[in-house]
């Protein structure tokens, strides 16, 4: 089954593509892929900068989830999606990530971080600053309060943050800012 969706000026890929994951897509992809590799994306960093109104919170009691923010560097996973699955996987991921249009899909270049110096064009979902759910930078206290209170249809926000940190640790990736948040959550 192929997708016939219109994606707000973003064309669905019709051939094989790479998808850069930096949050829950890393540990819960739920789509077919032919390869997954550690990847580094320059010019962005992982941040708890998006109010979650669906998956990890509600509009009345939001959680806080990750978005890509400009500046720095972020490590994650690049998934290679085969051509025969490209449209369907894009539609599935787009629907999952864009449930409230809080992200903007962009094509960017990331480096595959497995000892080979190979760059690939990859689809990534960047925090959309004009969306009402964009939380921006919060104090550590506000961040912790939002993460602790959030609970949505996918479960508690604390679980989401811990799953992401644990997956990063399993990959040998250390995100110092996120490690500090997790240490405070454990207090």
Image (cartoon, helix red, strand yellow):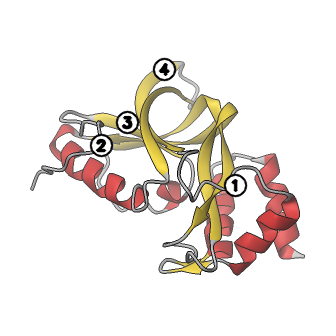
Vertical comparison of 28 with 117: above or below = below
Q: Is residue 11 left or right of residue 161?
A: left
Query: In the image shown, does 61 or 106 lie closer to the viewer?
Result: 61
On the image, numbered disc 4 is attached to which residue? 118
Cα–Cα gap, marks 2 and 3: 20 Å
Residue, x 68% and y 74% (percent of image)? 158
Left or right of residue 126, residue 12 in this image? left
- Residue 178 at x, y percent in the picture: 76, 54
Residue 184 lies left or right of residue 31; in this view the side is right
What kind of element bears circle 1?
Answer: helix
**Where is mark 1, residue-wise?**
169
* Residue 48 coordinates in the image, percent (x, y): 68, 55
Question: Could you tell which of marks 4 and 2 lies nearer the N-terminus?
Answer: 2
Q: Is residue 74 left or right of residue 6?
A: right
Residue underneath mark 3:
18
Question: How many other residues sit within 10 Å of disc 4, few (<14), some (14-19) or many (≥20)?
Answer: few
Q: Is residue 186 above or below residue 130?
A: below
Q: Which mark is residue 8?
A: 2
| Residue 167 visible to the viewer | no
């Amino acid at each position: 089954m192929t997708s016939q969706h219109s994606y707000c000026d973003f064309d669905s890929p019709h051939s094989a593509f790479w998808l850069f994951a930096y949050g829950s897509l890393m540990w819960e992809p739920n789509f077919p892929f032919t390869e997954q590799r550690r990847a580094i994306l320059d010019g962005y960093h992982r941040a708890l900068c998006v109010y979650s109104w669906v998956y990890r919170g509600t509009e009345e009691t939001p959680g806080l989830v990750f978005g890509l923010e400009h500046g720095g560097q972020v490590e994650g996973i690049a998934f290679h999606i085969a051509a025969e699955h490209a449209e369907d996987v894009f539609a599935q991921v787009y629907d999952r990530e864009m449930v409230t249009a809080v992200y903007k899909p962009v094509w960017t270049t990331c480096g595959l971080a497995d000892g080979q110096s190979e760059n690939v064009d990859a689809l990534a979902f960047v925090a959309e600053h004009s969306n009402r759910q964009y939380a921006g930078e919060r104090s550590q206290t506000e961040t912790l309060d939002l993460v602790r209170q959030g609970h949505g249809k996918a479960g508690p926000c604390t679980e989401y943050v811990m799953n992401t940190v644990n997956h990063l640790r399993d990959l040998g990736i250390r995100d110092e800012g996120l490690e500090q948040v997790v240490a405070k959550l454990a207090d």
